[in-house]
Every structure is written in structure tokens, then in C-alpha cells.
Amino acid sequence: MSYLKPENPTGCTIWLTGLSGSGKTTIARNTKKFLEKFNIPAVHLDGDRLRQTLNSDLGFSKEDRRENIRRVAALAIMFAQEGYISLVSLISPYAEYRLAARDAHERAGLKFYEVYVNTPIEICEIRDPKQLYRKARSGDIPEFTGVSSPYEVPICPDLLIESGIYEIEECCNKVLRLLVDQQIIPSSTLDPVDRHLPITQKFDLIEASKMLPKIQIDQLCLQWAQVIAEGWATPLEGFMRENELLECLHFKTLTANNMVHSQSIPIVLPITDADKHKTRGFESVVLHHGEKPVGLLTDIEVYEDRKKERCARTFGSVDVGHPTIKQIIESNTQWLLGGKLQLFERIEWNDGLDHYRLTPQKIRHQLIQMKADVVFVFQLRNPLHNGHVLLIDETYNKLKATYSHPVLLLHPIGGWTKDDDVPLEVRIKQHQVLLDEGILDKSRTILAIFPSPMSYAGPTEVQWHAKGRIVAGVDCYIVGRDPAGVKDPSDPSRDLYDPTHGAKILQMTPGLKCLKIIPFRVAALNKKKNKMEFLGPDFNQVDYELISGSRMRQMAREGQKPPEAFMHPKAWQVLADYYESYQTTK
Amino acid sequence: MSYLKPENPTGCTIWLTGLSGSGKTTIARNTKKFLEKFNIPAVHLDGDRLRQTLNSDLGFSKEDRRENIRRVAALAIMFAQEGYISLVSLISPYAEYRLAARDAHERAGLKFYEVYVNTPIEICEIRDPKQLYRKARSGDIPEFTGVSSPYEVPICPDLLIESGIYEIEECCNKVLRLLVDQQIIPSSTLDPVDRHLPITQKFDLIEASKMLPKIQIDQLCLQWAQVIAEGWATPLEGFMRENELLECLHFKTLTANNMVHSQSIPIVLPITDADKHKTRGFESVVLHHGEKPVGLLTDIEVYEDRKKERCARTFGSVDVGHPTIKQIIESNTQWLLGGKLQLFERIEWNDGLDHYRLTPQKIRHQLIQMKADVVFVFQLRNPLHNGHVLLIDETYNKLKATYSHPVLLLHPIGGWTKDDDVPLEVRIKQHQVLLDEGILDKSRTILAIFPSPMSYAGPTEVQWHAKGRIVAGVDCYIVGRDPAGVKDPSDPSRDLYDPTHGAKILQMTPGLKCLKIIPFRVAALNKKKNKMEFLGPDFNQVDYELISGSRMRQMAREGQKPPEAFMHPKAWQVLADYYESYQTTK
């Protein structure tokens, strides 16, 4: 996501006041770091550092403290006038001077938020990062706030942070939450969209919606409804309206509140002429899947589905030999129905896998509980062999050099896939075996389902796979040659997409600049050493065996067993069982 | 164009020093305005204004002036550290203190440019915008620089501006040129790309290039070569390489030096297998058109032309019934040749129209000479009737409310058009008659040819038509329903594109935010009043006659004459003559 400077930017000032050592500077610094990830302009005006530059002529007398605050306020105003969020960390012990700073902002027409970082002096004194309390107690520093100079507690601060109790992330979150509540920054920076109606309203609204036209949606649209409602396509709040679709088709983005988000795959609700007729005169409709009312679509808009153009701009093809293009072109729908979506309740599939279907919000919570400081995702729609595991381990080890707690989000795609792909339940079972057997480390892995359908749109889809994971809090994305993974229907000896385009395009996608792209490396079985190794430029065909996805499926179908170094036997058994039963069914 | 904040932004300080009234503030303010058009962060730190806020405690004693400069320097440094160009306008009369400001920047690792705004005190005193000289002379203001307090002239400023001699635009230009030369801002903000070899090198290079493989280019590619070399596709410096094409196809942009430019139409050089073979082992080739060597392509790259994908993503269609798609798909080329282009000389067509083929740079110069303060463009590939003239007049009058010298760039497309379009020479002749007859005002119009070929790519092409004109200095773009202007080859009763999409998409195109989009209004002949009028919602079919482009062509073919209110008879005669000779030829 990337923030665009509005035409008339209005910034504001967050004024952090509190004792020395209370945590003001750390909160300001981390809040700034967070905002910068989204390109939101923020500046940290630190009292201590300013005393070395702008305010190097000032001491600690009451008069000098007044002047210090006056100047910092003037500075904060200048940055706020440029559209910045000025994060001031300054002891500012006197209420009168803080009030003067607020007045100066109000005279300039700018918002000023006083944030009291309330940490008991005992804790500050234990922290004592600069050994100032020690010096103040010994008399080496005169007029030290809290020891030999007063601190006037804010009576009615805009925000109170008990930084002695909460962790730093939570303190920053309080500041960020304030900025969202005050509509200074878009809520999508903090929270994925959540379009589920509160349980208290559910029954009343189902009742009331009986007056509205019913639109039947199929399983594919139900999967997209889940994607929207759980916030994977944040800031999208429903099925795309025409302007949203045009931005997506032409620029692969979605802009809301000056924030540019990546959105490469159209999320639309196709309807028939008869459905269009039904909606006439209504501003809302109720969506049904079979007998079940699923949710409301409000503030609706019906517009032409220019199917071929939609396919051409999304898939770079209009060939109906392509599975998704076929669905779109051959359906009996002519129109698209856009509008805001609200689901009556979470969508569940009752296939025994719903507990793997974690919302982005839920994943974020789990990551916090795991104390993850960096998260990498492995996107896949195939079983995982030891070549993949090697890549995961290597990525983990590289991240470990910089971070304390890298966590892997193992995130197989859970929506519609084409018939010859391995079904979701088999893949999940296979992944779970790898966790249970310790091939993947449970303590640093989340296995969850990405509920999106596959579109097989190659380099366009890979952007969507990356963007959806940003919403869940992911920092690094491993991209493979998967984007090429369908054959050209008009020449099945060729890939439909250039296998290198996915990775190339991810490097330039607007709205994905905050994501680190990790290139996929191909591994093969070293037959001599009987282990998986990455293929280097000096690889010789004699020593290595490359087992491709189709070769793997073929072996499973034919009841062959690959070497144990390729895949743990229990995991292999899951695949073998599936292909056995598959062939029996056939 | 839009500037992206780099990951580690480094700003700098432009320190404008000079007497009161010398023009420092005006130069700073206008430079800031220019930079903001491109989203380049710039802040104006004005001495006078800062004395009301940050420096309100200071007077004009030498010591206070020192402190004033010290604080402003600290402030400039803080903004520069945020990636800003700090534009300081401050008398700063003492060399010693200016040196201190420079030192402070250098200690912080930031560039500092001293700009001496050298205006003779006599001129400053005549200007005397704040009546300060008068008060100083009468003794009401003590210690006034140049009167009762010294001004130490900079001995070796980074830039000297004689603001008494030059106009304000030229003064700003000197500052901007400094920023370009110092690689602080991309050169594309000031200058279109110019890829013509200096005349001094021409013959040597033609000689030397005889060693290089020859690639024959057709007329269409020659037109594109002209587009590139004259800078219409700035910052593109040659035929697209793969990364440039991918960004263009997927995101409709081209990013260079952190500046995002709109670029919706691919500009590529398709070559055959045989040509590819020829380039093997070479880093450069020479381009020929017929017998004539046209230019050099250096640092070349050959990559696959995924024709269908290229068409699908550009045209939203792969239908070979479309004239441009047909050319692309049915050509005998398989590869694209990317690289930097340099032409041996300007391309001329010797059709009697070359003097209308003004480069963007030339148009910018003419606009300056005409003292244009706002420029609007009318893009067209058809004759101009009085409905168009009405729109031009209305736009002019609206702009006149805010600006002193609005200028129209009448800019017909000059490259390849499909066979049934009116040829360029006829259109130019018709436009010229309108100017000669005073239907359009010569004193506020530039008639020039936009050398690009048409692609008939609808909403994708309209972005290119707008972007090309930005390079020539245009501020406002009139967009019509022209983007729809081809029929769907698979259903000729329909437009290929939705006629409203062009205008909708222009509103969201990245890199076009600095362009004002003026929606087209349809005019028809009011038969009662015998004049052209815009169609309002209350328009009744009986009173009005709507003469469409095809109706117009039909009338000309059949020798009918439209009412004089529709088009000046002399202009109509140009069309009638063309269609007469056309039919004779046929």
C-alpha cells in the first residue's frame, strides 16, 4: 500500500508528554516506522535531539523550557502544514506551556493531540536509559523533572498510555488507533475490511431483507464474497462497482482515502438480464446461495459486463480453452452488480477444514501471540516436497540473521481450482503431516487457508496472491514460476505466460512496495548424497533428479514411491491414497 | 508525472540571499509551485514569515541575525533530511553566518546551494513591496540592510541570479536547472528527451555504423522513432526493453528516477527471426528506412513478442478485424528489439507539412514567447466544425477568468491513421482555413502536428494522447468520446469501447494528476437560431440537427453543403474537394 499526498494535505501533531524514560521516544520512533511503511509522511521531533540542533542555546530553567516548547510547537506546525504527522517526544512538564503549544496549533487550524505517556517514576528510574536519574539523585543534574523539578500531570489528555503496563507495539497501536479514529490516516492501515453484520442485527436484517430482490450467487461468487467480507481485498467493501473495476483492469490498483492498494484481479458479481430486471428501483438486494440468505448488497450499481475486454485486460487472452476465461465467456450473464457487501454471518464450508480458514485479523493476532517480528508466506496450490522445505528453511535462516522471530505463513489456496489440481483437503492433510512429523517447525509456522479461488491469470494473479497476504501482516513473499502454471490452450506445448514475468512484475507493482519479494529457487534430488539441493549453474544432469509437479502426480498415480529424501513417506502416502481412490472413482 | 519518495530520500537546501525586495521570496514561491506540480517535496522557509513564528523572539541586531540564520539552517536541515528541497529566502547579509549555515549542512551530509539574488538596490527600492526602504530612509526602521546595515556580497555563490534583468520564470528556471544539473530532480521535469545526435557527430557515426548490423524499419516504426527522439514519450529513450514493456502493459506507467510517468501505449520495434540472428554478438545496430540510415540503437535487448498478450493488454481485444491488432498479429515478426535510440538527424516527411511538426521543446518555446500562463489542447483526427469551435471558445473563456493568457494547442494526430480517416494534409488545410478566416484566433493558437501514429486503442490510447501533450507543456486536456471511435469488429453495430470509459479512466491515470481534464460537450445546430449550441438535458430533436462525423463525411461525398453555421464555407470546400478527388481516384 502506498499513500498519495492529497492535494491539500493537512497533518497534525501528536504531542507525547511524560517523564524522562517513560517511553515517549520509543513510541514516537516506532509509530513513525509504521507510518512510513505506508508512505504516510511522519516526522519525529525529539526533544533531546533538538537540544543538540535548533535548541542548542537553551537550558533547563523554567523560562528556557517555555522557549523550548514554543519552538518545538512552531516546528511541529510547519511540518503539519506540509501534511506531516508530527510526532513530538518532549517531557514538557508544565501544563501552561503545553496549552500554549495547543493554542498555537489551533490558531494555525491544525489538530493537536496531547498524549500522556504515564509511566510510574519507579519504572522510569529502573529503565534510566541515559543514567539521568542516577545523576539527578546525586545532584549532578539540577532541575531534573520528577526529581528536582515538577511534572504537572495532564488533566485531560487526548490519549493516556500506561507504557509501564503495555508492550511497545500496543502503545504504538493506541496512537495509531487515535489517528484512525480522528480520520487522519485510513483505517485500512490498521484493520482489514470486515463486512460481517453484528450478530445482534442478523435476524432483524434477514427478516427485513425479505422485502428485497433475491439474487442467487453460485459457489464461486460465494468464495469471492468470503474474500471480500474477511478483508483480503481491503479496501474493497463489496463486489466492484464500475469505477473500481476500471481502475483494477487498467492500472491493477484500488485507491481509497489517498491510499493506493494493489488489486490486480477483478472481484465482480455477474448477473443475468432477469436479475438486472429484478433490481430495478431498488438500492439493495439480498444475496442467496441456494436456500440460504448470505448477505446484503447495498448502494448497488448495475453495469455492462464487457466480458472479452475484462478477460483480455486480466488474462492477456480471450481464449476459451483457458478454464477461467471459459467460465466467464460462456456463462449466461451479461451484467455486473456492484455494491457494498455485508454478510449475515461468516461463511463456513463444513468440510472439516473451517478451522484452517483464519481471517486476516485472526492471523495478525496469532502472529502477535507468536511474537513474530517478520513474516514470510509460501503461497501454493500443490503438495509440498523437500525442495520447498529447503527453500523455507533457507529463507528462515536468512531472516534469522536480522530478526528474532521469523514466522512462516503456509497458506495454500482454498477456493476453486481446476479439476486436475490436487484437491484442498488432500493438500491440507499433506501439509499437516509435514508439521506433525516435524519436517516443518510447528512453533514458527501458521498453516491456514487463503479462501480465494484460483484464476490462473499468471503474472496478474501473482500480484493478487501477494496483496492478499499483505493484509494478513506478511512482510516477505516467496514467488515461484507458478505464475506460468497453465498451458497455452492454443499450443499446449507452451506455457501461457512467460515464467519469469511474475517475479519481474512483482518488483514494479504499485501498492506492493512494502513487501519483500523472495525469488524461488529450484531444488532437485542429489542422487549421490540422497538429499535435496538447490540447482546451481554447475548442476549436472547425471547426479540430480528433477521431480516436477506433473512427474510427482504421475508417480503417485502409478503407485511408485519417490526416495524418502524427496518427501516424508507419511506425506507421500496422503497423495498416494488420493490418487488410488481417484482412479477407483474414475 | 508524479514523484515517488525514494527509500532513502536526500533533500538539499537552496539558500536565497539578497537585499530586501530583490525577489528571493517570489523565486522561492514559484519554484516550490513548479516542483509541487510533479509531487517533488519542497518547502519554502521565508525569513519574514519565520520572524512571526519560530523566530518571533529575535530582533535585527547582528547577534540576533546570527541566531536567526542558525535556526533557519537547523530547520532547513530537518526538512532536507526528510527528502525536501528547502527553499530558504532570507536576506542573510553576513558572509560569516551564511558560511555557518553551509557548514551545518555539510556536517549533516546535506547539499547546500548559495544563490545570490543580485538586484541593484535602486530596483529594490523602487519595488519596495512592504514600504520598508521608505521607513528605513526616514529612520523609522534602524539597522536596515543596504541602508543602515551592511550586506556582504557573496564572493562565490553556487548560482547568481540577476533578478533585475530577467523575468521571474527565467529566474526560477535557473534554480530548477541547478537542481537538474546537481541530479537532485530528474531532468524530465524540465526537458523532454531529445535523442538526436549532434550534427558534429553525425557523419562520423554514420561511417562507423557501417560495421553494425542493419535493421530495416517500416514507416510506422519510423513514426514511432520520431515520437521517441523528439521526447513525446519522455522519459523513454528508445524502443522499449522488456521491463519497460511489462510496466507499460500491466500498469500503464513508466518509472525513471523515482518519477512515475503515464505510458499506456507500448512503443516497440518488432523484428523477424532473421533480424534477430543478425544482432547476435552485437550491442548496437543501425536502423535503416529504405536506403537511408536513420539512427543507432544501442545497448540492445531482443525478447519475445508475445503478440496476443501484448494486444490483449493494450486493446482489451485480440480481434484481427481491428486495424492495429491486424497489423501486429499478421506481421511476419516474432521478436522485439529494445534499446536506446539516437537519430542521425530529425525525421522529415517532405510533404509540405514539416513546418507544422513542432517538437515539444519548440512548442514550449513558442508558449513562452506567447506569454501563455495556461495551455489547453484539443486532440483530434477529424475536421473541426463549429461545435468544436464553440467548445474551444467556452474553454478559453472559462480559463480567462483565472489566467491572463490561455493558449490553445490545436494538435491533430499526424502519424498513421486507418484508410477511411480524413488524410492529414486535408485536415491541416481545413484547420489552417479556420485560422486564416479568424474562426479561431491566431494570436492565441498554435497549430502543430502530433507525430504519433493512431492505435485505435480507446481508453488506453486516450492516456497516451494526454501524456504526449504534457511533455509539450499543456495544462488542460479536452477529452471527447473519441476513445470509442472504432467499431467492434465482431459486431459493427457496437462501439468497441464504452464511450464513457476514456474520460473515466483519465481521472484515475497515474502520472496525469498534473493535467486538468475538460469533458467534451456535444453541440448541435439550432435550426431556428441557425447557430451551434451545446445540447442540454432539455434539448428537443425538432429544433436541433446533430451532424455526426460520418454524416459530415457523407454530405461531403454527396456534394451537399451544410449550413454556414455548421462550418465556414471555405473550410467546407477543403473537405468537399478532397472527397471529390477521392471519388474520382476510386
Image (tube, coloured by chain):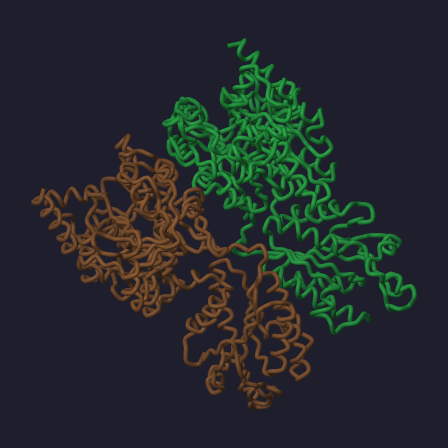
Chain colours: A brown, B green
A199 vs B278, left or right, is left
Q: Quadrant of residue B470?
A: top right
Residue at 59% across / 86% down in the picture?
Answer: A144
Residue B201 placement, left or right of B138: left
Q: Look at the picture and state if B444 lies above or below A443.
A: above
Residue A310 % position (x, y): 37, 39
Decide which of B366, A268 is in the foreground and name it. Answer: A268
Residue A395 visible: no
Which residue is at a point 67% across and 23% down the rendered structure image?
Answer: B433
Left/right placement of residue B494 relative to residue A17 reads left
Q: Could you tell me which residue is drawn at 64 percent across and 65 percent down?
A: A78
Name, please, the residue furthest toward the left. Answer: A584
- Position of A377 compared to B457: left or right? left
- In this orientation, which residue lies closer to the viewer: B124 or B564? B564
Marks counted in the figure total: 0
Q: Measuring 28% from the left and 30% from the top, which residue is drawn there?
A: A490
The answer to whether residue B500 is visible is: yes
Q: Position of residue A583 (x, y in %)?
A: 9, 43
Q: Is residue B336 above or below residue A92?
A: above
Question: Which residue lies most toward the right here?
Answer: B138
x%, y% of residue B412? 59, 28
Quarter of the image with the C terminus of chain A is top left
Q: Does residue B293 lie above or below A527 as drawn? A: above
Q: Position of residue A307 (x, y in %)?
A: 35, 38
Give the position of the N terminus of chain A as an image quadrant: bottom left
